[in-house]
Amino acid sequence: MRLSHFFATVGVALCLAASACQMTRDEGRPVVIPTEETAQDQVLSKAVRDRLLADKKVDLSEIRVVSNSGTVYLTGLVNSLDARQQAIKIAWEVQGVKSVVNSLEVKK
């Protein structure tokens, strides 16, 4: 019994390790950002953009927002990692957002 439990644990660990490698490999792919928005997408993008501009903690004015079927794409420049995290957090808080694609770059 103990040996079968050991092999089951090893099997699960190997599966998790394999899936983590798959996720890491996909991170380097370029992100395709939609060029057109439906009326509903435009409303969502505006809501996210308005919330970003209303934030007084960090400057998020150089962020471009595009939406597609509930997915929000954030691109542009921010001054710090904290600003980047704040922008992502704000986008997730907007009603109607199903996912956030972060392509923000931190200024050097």
Image: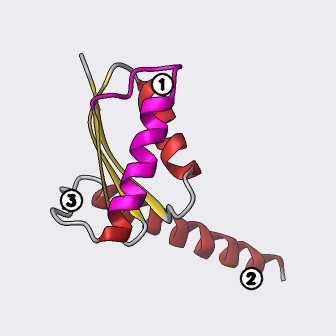
Check disc 1 and give the amino acid type. Asp
52 left or right of 31 in image: right
Residue that carries the numbered disc 2 in the rendered image: 4
The residue indicated by pointer 3 is 33
Crowding near the residue tagged with mark 3, few <14, some 14–19, many ≥20 C-alpha atoms within 10 Å: some
Mark 2 or 1: in front is 1
User: Would residue 7 be seen by someone viewing this image from the given angle?
Assistant: yes
Please state which of the two labelled residues, at mark 3 or mark 1, is closer to the viewer. Answer: 3
Is tag 3's residue or tag 2's residue first in the polypeptide sequence?
2
Disc 3 on helix, strand or loop?
A: loop
- At mark 2, the secondary structure is helix
Does 57 appear above or below 42?
above
The verdict on residue 43 being magenta is yes
Pointer 2 local density, CA inside 10 Å: few below 14, some 14–19, many at least 20: few
Q: Could you tell me the amino acid type at mark 2?
A: Ser
Per the model, the C-alpha gap separating discs 3 and 2 is 48 Å
80 relative position to 63: left or right? right
Look at the image and tell me in which quarter the N terminus lies. Answer: bottom right
The span picked out in magenta is 42-62
Q: Main secondary structure of the magenta part?
A: helix
- Nearer the N terminus, badge 3 or badge 1? 3
Q: Residue 28's spot in the image, x, y percent?
A: 23, 52
Q: Nearer the viewer, residue 58 or 15?
A: 58
CA–CA distance between discs 3 and 1? 23 Å
